Amino acid sequence: MKYPSIAFISFLFAAAITAADAKTARLDPDRLGWSEVQFRASVLFFSVDANIVLHPLAATDVTDQLMEPGEGAAIIADESVQQLVFTTDFIGRHTTAELLVNAGTGAALQRTSHDSGNRFRHRIYRFTDIGAYQRTRWPVGKDEEKLATDRWPEWSEAGEDLRPYPDAAMGEIVTDPGGLLYIVGAAQLAEPGDEIEILAYVRGHVHRVQIEVTQPETISIDYRERAGEASVERKGKQQAITLMIRGEGLDDGDDKDEFELLGLRGDIRMHMDPKTRAPLQLKGRVKIAGNVTMRIKELVLRQASIYNP
């Protein structure tokens, strides 16, 4: 019996490694040319506004912000961290959230969110090797609801626990859906067929998210682009990198456990600016209203040197 040569076995092993690496996000924050985007979507008789600010930080800048989890080993901050701050207004609810992810992998470190309006809640998720550990506070009575935003520690009702990952997520990189707005820009996603895969934690469930570049599409744009004191109106048609984003739950769930990004569910189509790698448009589905398109209204560039009106 003739056995395959060591060289042939080495070739197969290298090929397998290459195929696996093709779906692993290799992130370079220097690919991104934006620091803030503002979106608006019209849904039935109301509008949805979302603002996202992206800011690089050093690990030393976030150490004091990171909560110590009650269970599990906390994900450690790398030398370079990305902070994403989300502000959304949707049907009477105002939410501000801060997400910290490792710049090189997209791994989520911590997500802090504060809700007001028709729901009051302050929640911190600290991501660990075995799950997301959460601490939450709620106000009791109208008097506590009227407290200033930064006085949420005075809210009377509190709870905490570990939301464990399924076995398939153990030892894997897990991000938060909001982190995908950084990841798609920092990853090598440019030509049709380029793809990456990453796990994302969504409301107690972990989803395997596949992101693939499809054929470029030309979209209508109408937004203001700013860099320092300079600004310009971008209006007309623009060819964009087109991404399909699909999330599939690792465990059994129902429709309430769907993958979600900025309130959009199902298969999400994102159009990205090839130059700044900023998200220009997102299409998906929302409950009750159906298909919705979120369009960029303002873009702030990260550095004036790439600004070219």
Image (cartoon, rainbow, N blue to C red):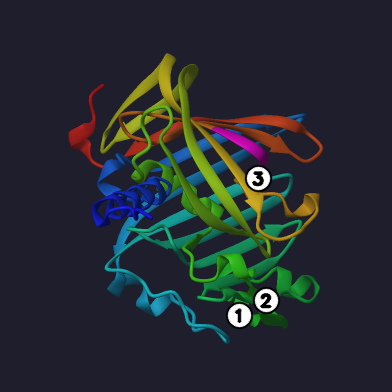
Q: Looking at the image, which residue is at 70% across and 81% down?
A: 159
Q: Between marks 2 and 1, how big is the CA–CA gap?
A: 7 Å
What secondary structure predominates along the stretch shown in magenta? strand
As shown in the figure, which amino acid type bears the numbered disc 3? Gly
The residue lying toward the viewer, choosing from 117 and 107, is 107
- The residue beneath circle 3 is 263
Secondary structure category for the residue under label 3: loop
- Vertical placement of residue 107 versus 244, above or below: below
- Label pair 2/1, CB-CB below 8 angstroms: yes
Q: Can residue 241 be seen by looking at this rendering?
A: yes
In the rendering, at what x and y percent does residue 188 appear? 34, 40
Q: Between marks 2 and 3, how big is the CA–CA gap?
A: 22 Å
User: Badge 1: how crowded within 10 Å, few (<14), some, or many (20+)?
Assistant: some
- Label pair 1/3, CB-CB below 8 angstroms: no
In the rendering, at what x and y percent does residue 179 appear? 47, 53
- The residue beneath circle 1 is 153
As shown in the figure, which amino acid type bears the numbered disc 1? Pro
In the rendering, at what x and y percent does residue 272 appear? 43, 31
Q: Looking at the image, which residue is at 42% across and 27% down?
A: 192
The residue lying toward the viewer, choosing from 145 and 192, is 192
- On whether residue 264 falls in the magenta region, the answer is yes
In the rendering, at what x and y percent does residue 70 appear? 57, 87
Which residues, given as a range, are shown in magenta? 263-269
- The residue beneath circle 2 is 137
- Vertical placement of residue 148 versus 266, above or below: below
Residue projecting furthest to the left: 305
The residue lying toward the viewer, choosing from 101 and 151, is 101
Q: Nearer the viewer, mark 1 or mark 3?
A: 3
